């Protein structure tokens, strides 16, 4: 299932304004998880913001740098959604910053 997150603060990235992200977490594969491990450059666990950000980028089909450019509240919303997915929580069960 795809989840669209409307950003509270749109960001400028590569000449475009990004106001929402669509995460297709169900499309992730084991190869994506391993690649995100390498990209996160730090401790890897379901609780690691770096790992969650790398997975979010892959699920959105966007560069990791875009996820890193999000304002703190939006970054937290995105990573909480990924964390909920990794921990097997339904999106309505996951904590939300909204």
Image (cartoon, grey):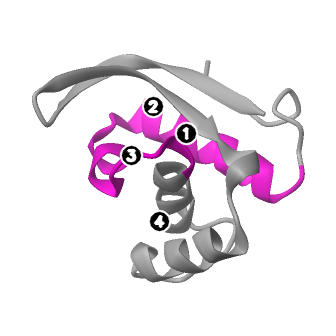
- Residue 82 within the magenta-colored segment of the rendering: yes
Point 63% across, 72% down: residue: 33
Q: Is residue 97 visible?
A: no
- Residue at 69% over, 47% down: 25
Q: How crowded is mark 4: few (under 14 residues within 10 Å), some or many (20 or more)?
A: many
Number of numbered markers:
4
Q: In this view, does 49 lie to the left or right of 62?
A: right
Q: Residue 74 carries which label?
A: 2
Q: Earlier in the sequence, mark 4 or mark 1?
A: 4
Label 2: few (<14), some (14–19) or many (≥20) C-alpha neighbours in 10 Å: many
Label 1 – label 2 distance at C-alpha: 6 Å
Image point (33%, 19%), residue name: 9
Q: Which residue in the structure is indicated by mark 4?
A: 50
* Residue 58 point in image, percent of width and height: 51, 55
Q: Tell me the distance, in whole angstroms, between the alpha carbons under discs 3 and 1.
A: 13 Å
Q: Residues within 10 Å of mark 1 (few under 14, many from 20)?
A: many
Q: Distance between the residues labelled 4 and 1?
A: 12 Å
Residue range (magenta):
59-88
Q: How busy is the neighbourhood of tag 3: few (under 14 within 10 Å), some, or many (20 plus)? A: some
Q: Is 20 in front, or is 1?
A: 1
Question: Residue 68 in the image: x percent, y percent?
Answer: 32, 50
The picture places residue 22, in percent across and down from the top left corner, at 55, 30
């Amino acid at each position: 299932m795809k989840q669209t997150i409307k950003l509270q603060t749109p960001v400028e990235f590569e000449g475009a304004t990004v106001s929402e992200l669509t995460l297709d977490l169900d499309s992730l594969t084991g190869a994506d998880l391993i690649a995100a491990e390498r990209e996160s450059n730090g401790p890897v666990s379901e609780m690691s913001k770096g790992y969650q950000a790398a997975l979010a980028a892959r699920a959105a089909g966007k560069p990791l740098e875009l996820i890193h450019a999000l304002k703190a509240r939006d970054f937290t919303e995105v990573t909480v959604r990924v964390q909920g997915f990794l921990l097997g929580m339904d999106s309505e069960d996951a904590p939300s910053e909204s």
